[in-house]
Amino acid sequence: MSKRYTITAALPYTNGPIHIGHLAGVYVPADIYSRYLRLTGNDVAFICGSDEHGVPITIKAKKEGVTPQDIVDKYHAIIKQSFIDFGITFDNYSRTTAKIHHDTAQEFFKTLYDKNEFVEEVTEQLYDEEANQFLADRFVTGTCPKCGNEEAYGDQCESCGSSLNATDLINPKSAITGNVPSLKETKHWFLPLNKHEDFLREWILKGHKKDWKPNVYGQVKSWIDDGLRPRAVTRDLDWGIPVPVEGGEGKVLYVWFDAPIGYISSTKEWAAREGKNWEDYWKDEDTKLVHFIGKDNIVFHCIIFPSMLKAEGSYILPENVPANEFLNLEGQKLSTSKNWAVWLPDYLIDFPNQQDVLRYALTANAPESKDNDFTWKDFQARNNNELVAIFGNFINRVVVLTNKYYDGIIPTPSDYSTIDEETLAAVKAYPAVISSSIERYRFREASQELMNLARLGNKYLADEEPWKTFKTDEARTKTVMFVALQIASALAVLSEPFLPFTSTKLKGILNSNDNGWEDVSTKDILIPASHQIGKGELLFSKIEDSEIQIQLDKLEASKKANEAEKKATEPQKDEITFEDFTKLDLRVGTIIEAEKMPKTKKLLVLKVDTGIDTRTIVSGIAESFSPEDVIGKRVTVLVNLAPRALRGVESQGMILMTEDETGKLVFVNPDTSTALSTGIEGVKNGLQIS
């Protein structure tokens, strides 16, 4: 029986093109799922659009000296066209600067406001005096209080995935001017998530959501168990959707309130164009709502957006949120700022008409349960050893032999042997097997089952050897080729969600487009005798080492550029007075104990004898030194730095480090510090060295 589905894919920020991390995490699995649902006869609305109100957009606009609208117009066009060229079959791809979205988001806010679902609070927020503005979210960077990542944003740490407030950051600085921000009072509206905690606990933890992916369920459970707090839904910005109530002047809707409503406004836009009722896809309990996102968006789609929908009162809630983990590139985290990425527009230029190769490589290595690594060598191997050598080889042999022996006309089979019957029965079983994997959001598993069907075809041909029986047993050869063509026809249908361009090409070669997903499991004959097929053409081409080397050279160039930028001499900072300098209390200490902080990559917990006491210092040097390396080391310590808590451990100072001429992290030499101290004390006894 046909069902109705609303499938959403996370709205991409329009501050840059799409890269392979976006594709692997969200858009390829969402497209596989949507294509499959359509093939199985369901009513599908596959919805997405550009998220055009994020702070990264305004930062990029400031850097480039253009308006935010210029930025979003440019990248919206690039992203939308890339999705079309790559074969992502959105039913509607909208944008959050569209009037229909502004109207929908403001109406949603006003509904909750009129129902008293918000609380109004005056709070202290970070403020950049030089820029004369409050610093929302990604306008602030600093050290994550949970993992020590020094490049955390004001809303989230991309290293450990923790959701943050800007005021949580250690040593925050403005992303606009680089200045240390001050605190200033401002009024905002908050969604009291604590009010919805019982509902979320009942719906997710006590309900039927244990079929959610473990990474999703675990993160949500952790948030709920930790106790939910009110979340601001407005910001002091001039780029965004104006707050539509009295007192909202100069404020806009927070992007994470605004963006998910984009799914609704995009559906409205599509429904109006197609003559449908949008409410059927958002307010009918018979509709299944599924969000495809990356793991950094889990909290927003599983806690905040459902709370918004529940507070509004008339919307359905998501049935599932199959978030993927992160995809790394050649062993390193993808980074748009460092150009450590494979950009989709570049791929489409470098590998023309090979969209399915990337789709397959990303699906076969999808980060479904843990972070995975994309390498160009694996990409090449997936293509050459699987798509070319297994799938393409089988189809090529079948088509070439059919044209060679029978001028492309499918022969009439004789009686089936046991192996023929077993092979055809196995083919009929594949739709159910692949369906089971897809419906459990195991797309990697499903793609390998598809490849197993191609393997079945290759094995059948290898075992039956029609090129040999053609001269000795004409009837047997006809039967073998007829059975092989049934396998090819099944591949043409079942490959469509995973390899849509290949599926279209294969259907063209077979001159057949009559079969659906269910036909493969129910029909005895998918392509009849006497049917004329076309001439053979290669479905996939071998990728040479030279093509891969070009991509590796691009990444190496990015790495060198990043290293050069890192080593570039920074401009002189603002002048300070000698009195400012004398406030520093530097002492030579000895590390007497050291251990790795659990569940972190960078942090060591050190016990340091400073001469005046023994204190704990948390230092982000674990990637350069093991605990055994540093015990007994004499180090220079800033002892009068205000204590900070890192992962629950209070750090009571700072070890001074620098880089040598090779870029290696080294301790500041205590002897150098002592010499410096002697010179300073000759002027004024303000720098203390023990």
Image (tube, rainbow, N blue to C red):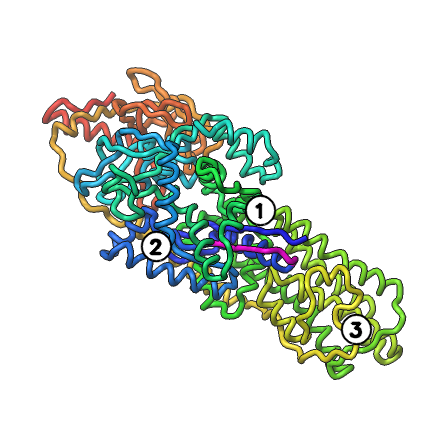
Q: Magenta-highlighted stretch: main secondary structure? A: strand
From the viewer's perspective, is 598 left or right of 363?
left
The one of 471 and 367 positioned closer to us in this rendering: 367
Residue 290 versus residue 192 in the image, above or below:
below
| Quadrant assignment for the C terminus | top left
Q: Please give the range of residues in magenta.
A: 40-47
Q: Residue at x 71, y 52 (%)?
A: 433
* Image location of residue 246, percent across then percent down: 26, 38
What's the mark number on residue 203?
none
Residue type at the position of mark 2: Lys
Residue type at the position of mark 1: Lys
From the viewer's perspective, is 454 left or right of 334?
right
Q: Is residue 379 visible?
A: yes
Mark 3 and mark 2: Cα distance apart in space: 58 Å
The one of 353 and 517 positioned closer to us in this rendering: 517
What's the mark number on residue 288?
1
What's the mark number on residue 481?
3
Query: Circle 2 sits in a helix, a strand or a loop, which is it?
Result: helix
For label 2, the residue is 99
Quadrant of res 176: top left
448 is within the stretch colored magenta:
no
Q: Residue at x 39, y 55 (%)?
A: 95
From the viewer's perspective, is 169 left or right of 220?
left
* Image location of residue 198, percent across then percent down: 50, 27
The one of 250 and 272 positioned closer to us in this rendering: 272
From the viewer's perspective, is 206 left or right of 676?
right
Residue type at the position of mark 3: Met
First in sequence, mark 3 or 1: give its number: 1
* Image location of residue 284, percent across then percent down: 55, 46
Categorize mark 2 by other alpha carbons within 10 Å: few (<14), some (14-19), many (20+): few
First in sequence, mark 3 or 2: give its number: 2
